[in-house]
Amino acid sequence: MIPVTKPFLPPRHEYDSYLDGIWERNWLTNNGPLVNDLELKIKEYLGLDHMLFVSNGTIALQLAIKALNLKGEIITTPFSYVATTSSIVWEGCTPVFVDILPDKLTINPALIEAAITPETSAILATHVYGIPCEVERIQQIADKHGLKVIYDGAHAFGVKVKGRSIFEYGDISTCSFHATKLFHTIEGGGVFTKDPELLKKMAYLRNFGHDGFEKFNGIGINGKNSEFHAAMGLSVLPSMEKIRKVKAAQFLLYKEYLNGLEVTFPNTEDIEQYNHAYFPVIFRSDKELKQSMQMLENNQIGSRRYFYPGLNKLGYTSGECPVSDSLSERVLCLPLFHTLTKEEQRMISRILLRVQNN
Ligand SMILES: Cc1ncc(COP(=O)(O)O)c(C=O)c1O
């Protein structure tokens, strides 16, 4: 079986090398030294001043919404993982869906203003597949209307725009460090901001609101992460460049092998530093997608409909999203992970070509 993704496991001795320290200190969680070290190393790697390591990418989004004290309506994308919408709903806000760009699959800035009402407090957009949203245009709109901006950067670790980490844009950016992500800590996530006050607020929120043992600075949640998860992150980080190179090469190879297949790909061409986290293929019809998916499955090959159904179909909908509706019916992610071989990529590509030529 070829899975659609496979978590990267670092050399065993690298992870093991952190365990003795954990046993010696007997410090397993609650902002331990490995958590601090990981935060430092991530900031160094991405060239950022502020970040917090949290339990997962969903809690990261909820902390961001809470820290910005958002109320009412949040303008968001229908084309993302369910956590983007669920976090809005769990924080008591209403998602208002704005359609996406047909080439990049990120929120269409030209449609945002029409969706703004007196109830709108923020824009929460996803850098889907690591493809950056139109961050400058979105910021202009937000500034004009006094809105906050959160980016769900769950897929965007290591992406750069104009020489800066993608996580520097917006009021707060979040990331997922789930096992299937490019950089991972098994379960985990991050919140990023340029604003030290917001960071401080999120640090309280991450730890129940504790300000010492007997005092509270607001009411928070348990958004902490453990020393074991931090150890995994510290062991994965040194391999990031290697993983990125392998994925970039696999990405190009798919495009070569799939030459002649009547599909399109999201536009990643003008991204300054992309991370090749996923390999989405856009079929001409959902019928072709389903035939291809079935044939891959018959050959023991996994694929996933990232992202179907559109989040505007969850029952919280307002607004029409025809572009997203059409694309989410036709997008399929092919296997892409560090140990996928050329032969496997060729076999996958041949199967897809065969389906279309029959
Ligand atoms: C776009 C997006 N946002 C948020 C999340 C949630 O991240 P986590 O699984 O770490 O909670 C994911 C997870 O896959 C995601 O793809």
Image (spheres, grey):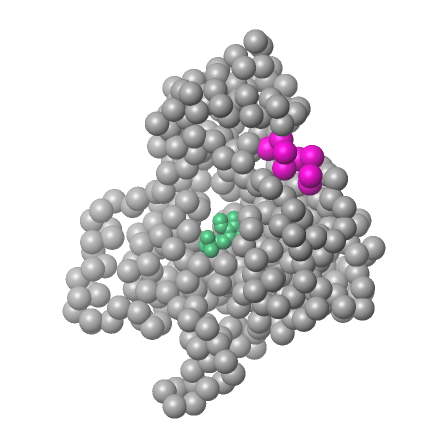
Relative to residue 152, is residue 212 drawn left or right? left
Estimate the x, y position of residue 324 in percent, counting from the top left.
Answer: 69, 40
Residue 238 at x, y percent in the picture: 35, 49
Identity of the residue drawn at 42% across and 71% down: 222
Most distant residue in the right direction: 114
Residue 131 vertical placement versus 60 (above, below) = above
Q: Is residue 45 magenta?
A: no
> Which residue lies most toward the top here?
358
Location of residue 272 with respect to 72 vertically, above or below: above
Q: Could you say which is closer to the camera, residue 50 or residue 99?
A: 99
Which residue shows up at 63% across the image and 44% down it?
310
From the top left corner, tell me how far across and down residue 100 is, in percent: 71, 44
Task: Please state which of residues 344 and 298 is positioned toward the viewer in this rendering.
Answer: 298
- Which quarter of the figure has residue 136? bottom right
State the count of labels.
Answer: 0
Residue 79's image quarter?
A: top right
Decide if residue 99 is on the left or right side of residue 218: right
Where does the magenta region start and end? 324-331
Tell whether position 326 is magenta. yes
Q: Nearer the viewer, residue 209 or 88?
A: 88
Camera-side residue of 185 and 33:
185
Residue 93 seen in the figure: yes
